[in-house]
Image (spheres, helix red, strand yellow):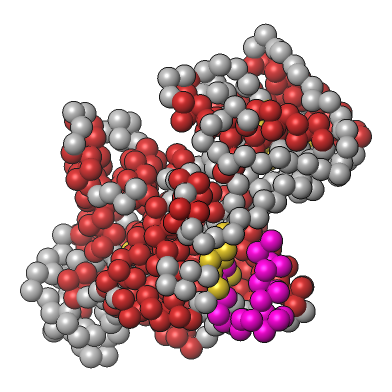
């Protein structure tokens, strides 16, 4: 829909390519949209801004961040970086990580940010645990600010703040992007809603595509009212109902429509398809999860025997449901992949390489520095790190490019960050400790070697493309040498992964109009689980939660665990809004089947 609208606007010369902005939610969807437009127009479309919300915000902030007192060289913290910050705070605050699990804490923080609420919002309740989470939220924000880092939610919030506080900037982009389009509008949260209104509020030339019946991300801040109230916000809007379904059979559509018809908070529509009839939906009732898992395995085997290339999807409400099915598939020798497991971009060596690039981009990123300062081992263990942490940099002048007292020949990379932030970073402490010889000669020598490595690589990064820089990072850091000397099968596999990452950098350079180190780091940091998932190449069964299945389709679909308290979830028993969310999940699950 959006791809054809863009192609029409450009081909009819109603819009220039650089006047078009289209946003969606996953990198895969954005890439497919861009490729469709290029195919329709038979031309290069790099001047169009077609991206995810987060990539859009990162791109805007890289250009305009100084307008709100933020360095253009900010770092984007991915989920691993965020957890590292929370773990550090738990140690500092002497809190038990079993009670305050980092993932749980970050989930609460993210949910608050999606509602545009701050740490104070956790002080309203009676629960003392909430107040501790509020303190962790406050410390988390402080740690990110001191490292000149943003998490994914901050990208949205800072862009909304930018347009609020710098009206001239907002007006410039609103004038430039005369045609704004949003896919999957039912999944937008409050900051995304405000961002779209800021860009399209004046010219009101806005087209959104969405299905209220597929709004299943309330748990991460999606606001169903955004799409239900669209005609109220834009009363001049014309609504076009896209009711023909090209994926599913008549039987599948009738079942899905019957389920979702029980919801009151929705827009009525009548789906239809040319694919009359279709196989009947099968119902199986097992005595326990093991019997259910055996049945799922039989279904998967039958599907493979019928069509070896077809994929079977096993969809469930919670991740805990996968274990029994995994055990059964494994025992039967059926290859499977769990969406959301360790994909390519989550592997240790890829995370290490990304941390090096982040550190080159922003040397005051303490999380990245801690990750790679002794990887591979270079004599900077816990004792050296403790000594480094204890270095007092009070009174050090970082107003210029170098702290006072250091040789002008030493390039410590202070430029680009406010002095207050640079003064608190580990990089500042490292440079001061080495320059003023505050540590033992052995400690100083190890830290000096690391300082010189990062400084030299930063110089390469200013002159060479990302792929060349990445190759030099892996070579000059000793990372590849360390793996080659290990001579194990695991190390060989990790080397292959790193070479694939270099290939990814080359692909990025060939696709982007303005490739840069910051852009490549952003791309890797913003990848979603679906984008990351590589899986086993011979896997014919894909297992995932219903939320992860959005936008996918399969020859065979199994909905597992359809029982009261599990799916629908127990928390929906006394809450009609939650029950409607469960029905939408079921609707999405059913319509994944072809």
Q: Is residue 47 visible?
A: no
Which part of the image, by quadrant, shows the C terminus?
top right
Q: Quadrant of the N terminus?
A: bottom right
Outermost residue toward the bottom in this view: 408
Q: Quadrant of residue 492?
A: bottom right
Residue 484 as seen in the image, left or right of residue 570: right
Q: Is residue 14 a member of the stretch shown in magenta?
A: yes
Q: Could you say which quadrant of the image residue 355 lies in? A: bottom left
Left or right: residue 387 versus residue 377 is: left
User: Which x, y percent locates residue 568?
Assistant: 55, 23
Q: Is residue 307 above or below residue 152?
A: above
Q: Position of residue 3 (x, y in %)?
A: 68, 67
Which x, y percent locates residue 297?
A: 77, 25
Range of residues picked out in magenta: 1-24
Residue 108 included in the magenta stretch of the image: no
Q: Is residue 549 left or right of residue 525?
A: right
- At x 82%, y 38%, the residue is 249
Tell me the residue at 45%/45% (across/down): 225
Question: Which residue occupies the foreground of this view, 427 or 299?
Answer: 299
Q: Position of residue 371 (x, y in %)?
A: 39, 58
* Residue plotted at (23% across, 43% down): 121
């Amino acid at each position: 829909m959006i791809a054809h609208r863009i192609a029409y606007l450009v081909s009819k010369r109603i819009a220039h390519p650089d006047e078009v902005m289209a946003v969606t939610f996953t990198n895969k969807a954005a890439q497919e949209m861009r490729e469709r437009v290029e195919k329709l127009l038979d031309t290069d479309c790099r001047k169009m801004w077609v991206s995810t919300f987060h990539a859009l915000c990162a791109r805007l902030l890289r250009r305009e961040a100084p307008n709100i007192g933020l360095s253009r060289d900010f770092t984007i913290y991915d989920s691993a970086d965020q957890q590292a910050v929370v773990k550090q705070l738990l140690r500092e605050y002497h809190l038990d990580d079993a009670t305050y699990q980092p993932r749980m804490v970050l989930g609460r923080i993210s949910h608050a940010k999606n509602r545009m609420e701050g740490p104070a919002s956790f002080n309203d309740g009676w629960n003392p645990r909430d107040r501790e989470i509020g303190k962790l939220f406050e410390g988390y924000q402080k740690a990110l600010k001191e490292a000149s880092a943003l998490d994914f939610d901050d990208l949205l919030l800072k862009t909304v703040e930018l347009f609020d506080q710098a009206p001239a900037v907002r007006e410039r982009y609103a004038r430039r992007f005369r045609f704004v389009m949003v896919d999957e509008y039912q999944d937008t949260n409050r900051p995304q809603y405000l961002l779209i209104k800021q860009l399209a509020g004046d010219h009101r030339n806005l087209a959104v595509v969405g299905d209220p019946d597929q709004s299943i991300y309330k748990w991460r801040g999606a606001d169903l009212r955004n799409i239900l109230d669209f005609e109220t916000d834009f009363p001049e809007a014309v609504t076009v109902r896209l009711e023909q379904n090209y994926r599913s059979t008549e039987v599948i559509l009738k079942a899905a429509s019957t389920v979702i018809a029980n919801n009151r908070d929705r827009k009525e529509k009548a789906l239809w398809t040319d694919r009359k009839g279709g196989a009947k939906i099968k119902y199986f009732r097992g005595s326990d999860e093991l019997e259910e898992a055996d049945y799922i395995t039989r279904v998967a085997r039958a599907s493979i025997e019928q069509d070896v290339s077809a994929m079977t999807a096993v969809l469930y409400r919670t991740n805990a449901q996968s274990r029994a099915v995994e055990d059964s598939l494994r025992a039967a020798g059926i290859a499977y992949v769990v969406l959301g497991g360790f994909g390519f971009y989550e592997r240790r060596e890829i995370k290490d390489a990304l941390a090096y690039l982040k550190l080159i981009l922003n040397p005051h990123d303490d999380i990245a520095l801690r990750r790679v300062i002794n990887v591979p081992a270079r004599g900077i263990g816990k004792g050296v790190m403790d000594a480094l942490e204890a270095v007092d940099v009070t009174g050090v002048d970082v107003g210029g490019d170098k702290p006072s007292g250091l040789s002008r020949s030493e390039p410590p990379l202070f430029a680009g960050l406010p002095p207050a932030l640079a003064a608190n970073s580990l990089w500042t402490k490292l440079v001061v400790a080495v320059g003023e010889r505050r540590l033992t000669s052995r400690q100083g020598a190890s830290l000096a070697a690391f300082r010189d490595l990062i400084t030299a690589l930063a110089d390469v990064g200013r002159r060479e493309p990302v792929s060349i820089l990445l190759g030099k990072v892996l070579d000059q850091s000793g990372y590849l040498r360390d793996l080659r000397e290990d001579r194990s099968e695991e190390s060989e596999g990790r080397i292959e992964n790193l070479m694939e990452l270099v290939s990814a950098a080359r692909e990025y350079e060939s696709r982007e109009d303005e490739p840069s180190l910051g852009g490549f780091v952003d791309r890797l940091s913003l990848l979603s689980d679906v984008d990351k998932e590589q899986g086993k190449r011979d896997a014919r069964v894909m297992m995932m939660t219903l939320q992860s299945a959005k936008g996918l389709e399969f020859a065979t679909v199994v909905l597992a665990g359809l029982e009261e308290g599990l799916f629908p979830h127990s928390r929906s028993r006394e809450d009609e809004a939650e029950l409607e969310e469960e029905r939408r999940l079921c609707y999405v699950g059913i319509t994944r089947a072809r």
